[in-house]
Amino acid sequence: MEKEWGIVEVLRHSRHDWLNKLQLIKGNIDLNRIDRAKEVIDEIVIEAQHETKLTNLNMPMFASLLFTSNWKNPFFRLEYEVLEDAEPLKMNDSVLTNWTSSFFSCLNKAIEAFQENHLSITIEPQSEGIRFFFDFSGIIIKSELIEKFLGESKSLEIEIKEFSESELALEVFIPKL
Amino acid sequence: MEKEWGIVEVLRHSRHDWLNKLQLIKGNIDLNRIDRAKEVIDEIVIEAQHETKLTNLNMPMFASLLFTSNWKNPFFRLEYEVLEDAEPLKMNDSVLTNWTSSFFSCLNKAIEAFQENHLSITIEPQSEGIRFFFDFSGIIIKSELIEKFLGESKSLEIEIKEFSESELALEVFIPKL
């Protein structure tokens, strides 16, 4: 575990997130929007299921990076989903984590601060490995940083699906060990 | 942070706890017990406030011990409350944590498994230190273990307020450094 994330800190951030969700439920109940409150609960449960699936991939470094990303207040909001609850494969956790962590840093420097910047990661476990789709939408102001970073990313098999000033879509495949 | 509690594990347990709370809200909404659902939310918020106050005491080892206790599935259920949100004092975190951790182990060996065993810790910050009230109710079957442990507890100022087969109440005062 990274030094800065002790139990107390992890739970402090997590508690803050959950209390925000609770506030959303409470707000809808107070306004007597009971059906909306139920929907909010269902959405929260689905989000938690993705977190559980991410945990079950047995890539603790990568999962920790994703769990803590929004707590570091980057200029983009991270979301993720795991498509299937597959048998965990033996994967190279550190290679993917190091690359993703560098990608987050690069992206953070390349985009315009305080805009609607979203990064969505879709994780698709397959029989021979795991396919990762990174979809960014927002405002890219220094695309040369991303070009340079992608050019230097030799450790992974990366396909650039889309790259404009408002979108970046990458597909990364990590074969099982 | 203890090795066994990585970010992923801490969040896994915490998620499980929060989903249980969410289930309680959802169950009441589904039964159209809207007022009860609101009460449940209020109770959850109060519990979270105690966790925040515990975090703010600036005793991360002690807070971590309390946060993780129920996740280790002891034969007693731990609850705690912090009476005031005081200025954090400079305290000897490790002395209190080591003693409390040993007390938990001793209690766990001294009580009957799978019974209604509850340990409540009330934390009262004061100007000269912090006062801790440990109140156990349940079934003590090996009181000699507790007697021995308390007799050997030289590092802390402990007052035994109550000690029977169904109750143990201790008051511990930790002066500020």
Image (cartoon, coloured by chain):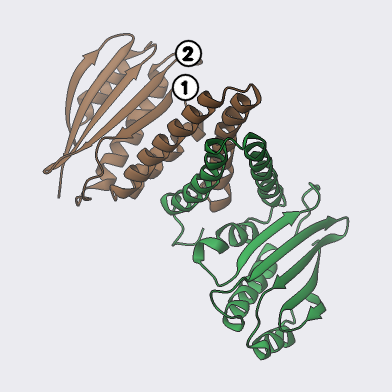
Chain colours: A brown, B green
| Figure check: A168 above or below A41 | above
Q: Is residue B130 left or right of residue B62?
A: right
- Which residue is labeled 1 in the image? A75
Residue B128: name its quadrant: bottom right
Q: Residue furthest right?
A: B127
**What residue is at 88 percent from the left and 55 percent from the top?**
B127
**Which residue occupies 71% across, 72% down?**
B136
Marks 2 and 1 sit apart, C-alpha to C-alpha, by 8 Å
Instruction: Please give the label number shown on residue A115.
Output: 2
Residue A135 sits in which quadrant? top left
Q: Position of residue A122 (x, y in %)?
A: 28, 30
Which residue sits at x=45%, y=14%?
A116
Label 2 close to label 1 by CB (< 8 Å):
yes
Q: Chain of mark 1?
A: A
Residue kind at label 1, given as amino acid type: Phe
Say above or below: B162 vs B32: below
Residue B155 position in % (x across, y down): 74, 77
Q: Earlier in the sequence, mark 2 or mark 1?
A: 1
Q: Evaluate whether residue B56 shows in this view.
A: yes
Quick check: do tags 2 and 1 share a chain? yes
